[in-house]
Amino acid sequence: MSTLLDSTYISDKLDIDLPLIGVYDAPHDAMMDRVIEPVAHRRTCIFAYFNAWMRGQTLKLTSMNFGCKGSGYWLFGKETRDREELVDFLVGEEGLKCSGELMDDWLDVTPAYRSKHKCLYVGPIKNSMVEYLKSVTFFVNPDQLSALIVAANYHAGPEEGNPVDIPFGSGCMQLLTLVPDNEKPKALVGASDLAMRKYLPNNLLAFTVNVRMFDRLCSIGQDSFLNKPYLKDLIEFRRSTK
């Protein structure tokens, strides 16, 4: 795929007015716009840059400057703790599993993303960089999320299984690590990590798709549910109660 399909139609129909955010695995000298980087040696969640993304800025992460230890581990495979310390942190300090054994088992089957270029960019969609694009995220309210789940199922046959997952993991994992990088269209419901939610408006969740699913969403046309009464009635009802 040389250029992105246009997502304007589905975004307009669902009243999605926030920018779509892409994750790119690209070279250090990639031609991205308005690039910012985390303050070196300071622990910062990548979602602390949410407002910067909304302003059109792009966050550059590298294997040497990745924001926080979780991001370094899950996005670059940087082991800043040994396995026992990591399990103790996730279970003892964060309380994310009922036992260290279960957390250990989960880590065994959940590999970190390994960046091809040792550099990731997180920011608004840029068509000229599509060859490096790994995922696209819609930040949406519950009504919009419901419609996007319908959209993800619009072209899906039973042989494909469920096209939408709600995976356990950190917010940065849900942007990239847990997104299948293949030809099978896939979507994830994300922003369920309690540690990062304070950086988002309280009515927003993330709907993250791989490139193949993004193509599908962009191809949905006028004969679909996007122009049928249920969606129109819901949108009109919400507008009338503001």
Image (cartoon, helix red, strand yellow):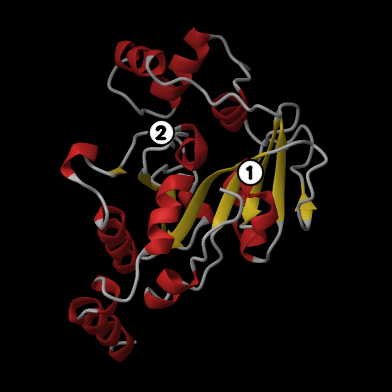
Outermost right residue:
29
Report which residue position mark 1 lands on: 131
Residue 207 seen in the figure: no
Tell me the amino acid under the disc marked 2: Gly
Residue 202 pos. (x, y %): 42, 62
Residue drawn at x 42%, y 42% as measured from the top left: 193
Residue 72 pos. (x, y %): 62, 28
N-terminal of the two: label 2 or label 1?
Answer: 1
102 sits to left or right of 196: left
Outermost front residue:
2
Residue drawn at x 75%, y 27% as measured from the top left: 64
Instruction: State which mark lies toward you, 2 or 1.
Output: 1
Residue drawn at x 64%, y 41% as measured from the top left: 132
162 sits to left or right of 60: left
Q: Residue 167 lies in what quarter of the image?
A: top left
Badge 2 crowding class, 10 Å Cα cut-off, few under 14, some 14 to 19, many 20 or more, is some
Residues at discs 2 and 1 in contact (Cβ within 8 Å): no
Residue 51 pos. (x, y %): 62, 61
Q: CA distance from mark 2 to mark 1?
A: 27 Å
Outermost bottom residue:
240
Report which residue position mark 2 lands on: 169
Tell me the amino acid under the disc marked 1: Glu
Between 29 and 37, the one nearer to me in the picture: 29
Q: Residue 65 lies in what quarter of the image?
A: top right
Q: Is residue 110 above or below residue 11?
A: above
